[in-house]
Image: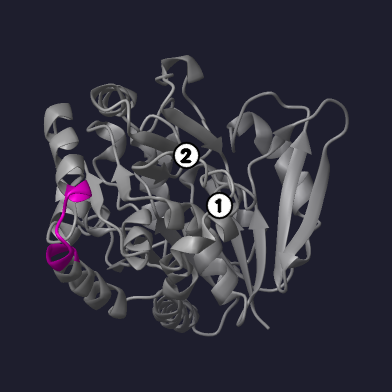
Amino acid sequence: MDSIVVFSHLRWDFVYQRPQHLLSRLAKHFRIAFIEEPVHQPGEATLTTYSPIPNVTIYRPNTPVPEPGFADEQLPALRKLLSTIDAARGAPIVWFYTPMALPLLDLFQASAVVYDCMDELASFKNPPPQLLPREDQLLARADVVFTGGASLYRAKKDRHHNVHCFPSSVDVAHFRQALDRNSAHPSQVDLPRPRLGYYGVIDERLDPELVGAVAAAHPDWQIVLVGPVVKIDPGILPRMNNIHYAGQQSYADLPKFLAAWDVCLMPFALNASTRFISPTKSLEYMAAELPIVSTPVQDVVDSHGDVVEIAAQPEQFIAACEKMLALPAADMLNKVRTMRAKLARTSWDATAEAMRMQLGQAGGTVRQSLGGASAGKSSGH
């Protein structure tokens, strides 16, 4: 069985999202070595490993270097640790979620190099100064580039000769568990109605002022925010009696939260960090067949504006929520029919399989260009 070595800025046990969905499916065909960013730990550098599912091994470097992420200062320790892993032998596909790890590529005789660009990381809070030039280098070296949405595709398509748009998809069966409204999470059942909910990472992409405005306008509404708070000061988050922070929850429990809610929210800030996002939760909310209200994130507007209520300003957002709570059953049924049609056209299984086909083509191109020589000698385009 061939191997894929993955360098990720996200941890496997963090919020379950695109990397876990795709790689857990690709693990049916490949051994996956998932290399996380290092954790600061005084003393000797060590490598923690565990296997969450068959054919996936997580490698978590622990180093005495304080600089975060795949910083240059981390590279000597990482080289020593990673040179010992099984995937360093043979000719694996090397798959990047972060360009910052590119200097470690030469540890492997890569049969193909993949850049799965799921976010515009340079637009996020406190990006490393080397990120943009390193992305240029990765785009020059990659054999195939995947993007997590249409906006990202438009941003990358002229920067590489082999770019493919693979928007984040959905496990419909998992989120359709929410259609049993009696399966609500225990933390939700005693909350008064109506309940309006959001789940996902709570960071600079969320608009705390908008959330606060919605809660203040309707003290009788219960606003539920599910997810970890990262990279922002928790003190900027609104604190009111009708706002409930549930913290990070397991992927298995997300349908139980949806089952308890009356409206699903995507209260994203409109800033650089959300310019290119394509929220996975859009389709997951649809699988629960609930009304959805979002700020005008471009990919949501373009792809789902026919079923998602779009509102930019707090007053408009509040009015959209009021409209969804009062939506006649016949109108909601029309939305549900459109949602079902969208869901029928996509799945994580189909996305992973289409990517696997691209991997085969990319690997074949590398082997052909080398004339049968070692794939590790391929240095770029």
Q: Where residue 147 sits in the image (x, y, percent)?
A: 33, 59
Direction from residue 317 to residue 15 in the image, left or right: right
If the image is split into quadrants, where does the C terminus sit? bottom left
Q: Quadrant of residue 63?
A: top right
Q: Where residue 227 sits in the image (x, y, percent)?
A: 51, 40
Residue 131, compared with residue 125, is above or below; it is below
In this rendered view, identify the residue nearer to me: 140 or 320.
Answer: 320
Q: Residue at x 47, y 46 (%)?
A: 99
The crowding category of the residue bearing disc 2, from other C-alpha atoms within 10 Å (few below 14, some 14 to 19, many at least 20), is some
In this rendered view, identify the residue nearer to me: 316 or 63.
Answer: 316
Q: Amino acid at mark 1?
A: His
Residue bearing mark 2: 191
In this rendered view, identify the residue nearer to me: 244 or 265.
Answer: 244
Q: Quadrant of residue 121?
A: top left
Q: Which residues are magenta?
A: 324-332
In this rendered view, identify the residue nearer to me: 197 or 75.
Answer: 197
Which of the numbered marks, if any, corresponds to residue 144? Answer: none
Q: Where residue 341 sits in the image (x, y, percent)?
A: 23, 77
Q: Residue at x 54, y 37 (%)?
A: 246
* Secondary structure type for disc 2: loop
Q: Where residue 39 sits in the image (x, y, percent)?
A: 71, 35
Q: Amino acid at mark 2?
A: Leu
Residue bearing mark 1: 185
The crowding category of the residue bearing disc 1, from other C-alpha atoms within 10 Å (few below 14, some 14 to 19, many at least 20), is some
Magenta span has 92?
A: no
Does residue 218 appear anywhere in the picture?
Answer: yes
